[in-house]
C-alpha cells in the first residue's frame, strides 16, 4: 500500500481494487563483476497489464536466475509469460503459456533502460564496475527496492 497516497487523501474517496495477476513479462539483464568472465544476471518480472514489478532475483547464470524467479513467482499463480526470444524461456516454459516477441515485452525493456541509465554498473560501456558480487547485488537490490517497491532500506 502506498502510504503517501492514503495519508494525503480523503478515506471516503479511496477505492481499492484487488485483482489476480494472470500474466507477467519476464526478462533477464546481464552484467558483470570485475571482468566479463564473472557474469551476473538480474531476472525480474512485471505485471503485464500495469507494469508493476512483481519480483526480482540476482544470480550467476540465466537458467539459475529463471528457476529462482519462477519459484518466487509461484504464489502469484501466473498462467502466462511474455518473454524475449531467449533459449532459457523456451527450455523451461510450456508453449501454451508462453508468448515470445518484442511488442509484448516493451514495458520490461523500458525498465531495463531505466536501470542501465541510473545504475552505471549496468551500462554497456562504462568506467564504473563492481569489484565484488556483494556490492553489485546490494546496489541493484537497493535501487529496485527504493524505486519499484517504494521501500526505504
Image (cartoon, helix red, strand yellow):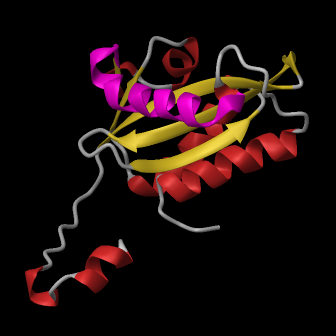
Q: Quadrant of residue 142?
A: bottom right
The residue at the far front in this view is: 127
Which stretch did the figure color magenta? 100-121
For residue 48, above or below residue 41: below
Identify the residue at image location x=83%, y=45%. 135
Q: Quadrant of residue 2?
A: bottom left
Residue 122 location (% of width, % of height): 66, 27
Residue 113 location (% of width, % of height): 48, 27
Identify the residue at image location x=63%, y=34%. 42
Q: Is residue 101 left or right of residue 57?
A: left
The residue at the far bottom in this view is: 11
Q: Is residue 107 left or right of residue 144?
A: left
Residue 9 location (% of width, % of height): 19, 82
Q: Could you tell me which quadrant the N terminus lies in?
A: bottom left
Asked whether residue 107 is drawn in magenta, I would say: yes
Residue 27 location (% of width, % of height): 50, 28
Amino acid at each position: 500500500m502506498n502510504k503517501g497516497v492514503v495519508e494525503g487523501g480523503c478515506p471516503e474517496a479511496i477505492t481499492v481494487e484487488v485483482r489476480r495477476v494472470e500474466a507477467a513479462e519476464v526478462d533477464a539483464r546481464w552484467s558483470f563483476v570485475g571482468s566479463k568472465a564473472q557474469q551476473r544476471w538480474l531476472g525480474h518480472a512485471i505485471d503485464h497489464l500495469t507494469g508493476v514489478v512483481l519480483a526480482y532475483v540476482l544470480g550467476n547464470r540465466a537458467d539459475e536466475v529463471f528457476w529462482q524467479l519462477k519459484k518466487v513467482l509461484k504464489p502469484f499463480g501466473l498462467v502466462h509469460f511474455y518473454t524475449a526470444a531467449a533459449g532459457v524461456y523456451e527450455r523451461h516454459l510450456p508453449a501454451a503459456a508462453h508468448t515470445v516477441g518484442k511488442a509484448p515485452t516493451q514495458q520490461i525493456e523500458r525498465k531495463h533502460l531505466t536501470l542501465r541509465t541510473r545504475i552505471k554498473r549496468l551500462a554497456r560501456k562504462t568506467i564504473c564496475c563492481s569489484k565484488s558480487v556483494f556490492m553489485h547485488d546490494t546496489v541493484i537490490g537497493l535501487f529496485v527496492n527504493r524505486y519499484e517497491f517504494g521501500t526505504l532500506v
